[in-house]
Amino acid sequence: MIKAILFDLDGVLVDSEKFSSEASDRILAEVGIVQTPAEKKLVFGRRTLDNYRAAIEARGLDIDPAVLVERKVKLFSKIIKGKLKPLPGVLRLLGELKDNKVKVAVVSSSPLERVNASLEEVGLLLEFDLIVSGDCCRMGKPDPEPFLFAASGLGVRPKDCVIVEDAEAGILAGKAAGMKVVAVRSPNTHGQDLSGADVVVDSVVEVNLSFLNRL
């Protein structure tokens, strides 16, 4: 019996990736960085700090990536005002899990301020038992640390958790943590390899507790 569901944020609970990309493009452009298509493909599911550090080092620049992350988060929080809503199926699934006393957590690679801004914008900030952001752990996805941290915080065993993800980095992290993974196809994740997941769905609409317990 599944005891906890760990949700990624962008592309799973809310469709905010386009706003995140817009904010990143604008902040990076201010310091002369224009990411290549190959670089953009690698950012999904990974921490903003790690992505910015890689872009800065690749260009031999002397810039503190943490400063850019802070600026990006503030811009993102402004951009999303009045534009975000939960993705189809999310409210129904969260309600079903709550009714059945299944614990729920958000495990995102984004900074906590950005995670909170997105969840508050769609009225879900208080609906989770735990929120794990990219600031919480020493390592980010695809390392399993964020998911193991979440399981420990919820008081459940990794094998009793199911992850809902839309990025390859998250799938790799989830499987390395010893958890089942449901991958959700997202148009914003630029052809991510979802083959490592236990099952792939087109939408959270397809996911319910019975479905999760059959994994």
Image (cartoon, rainbow, N blue to C red):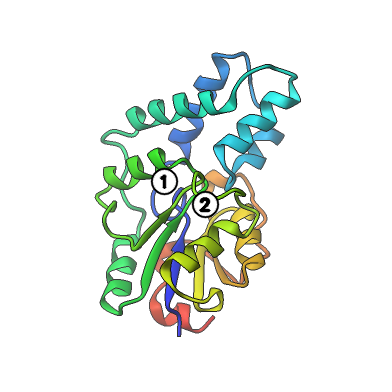
Check if mark 2's residue and mark 1's residue have beta carbons within 8 Å: yes
Q: Evaluate whether residue 64 shows in this view.
A: yes
Q: Position of residue 203 (x, y in %)?
A: 45, 61
SS state under label 1: loop
Q: Residue at x 57, y 46 (%)?
A: 189
Packing grade of label 1 (10 A; few <14, some 14-19, many >=20) is many
Q: Position of residue 74 (x, y in %)?
A: 39, 27
Residue 115 to residue 12: above or below: above
Q: Position of residue 17 (x, y in %)?
A: 47, 40
Horizontal placement of 107 versus 126: left or right? right
Q: Amino acid at mark 1?
A: Asp
Q: Residue at x 37, y 71 (%)?
A: 103
Label of residue 46 in the image: none
Q: Residue at x 49, y 43 (%)?
A: 110
Which quadrant of the rendered structure holds the N terminus? Answer: bottom left
- Residue with the mark numbered 2: 186
Q: Position of residue 109 (x, y in %)?
A: 52, 47
SS state under label 2: loop
- Residue with the mark numbered 1: 15
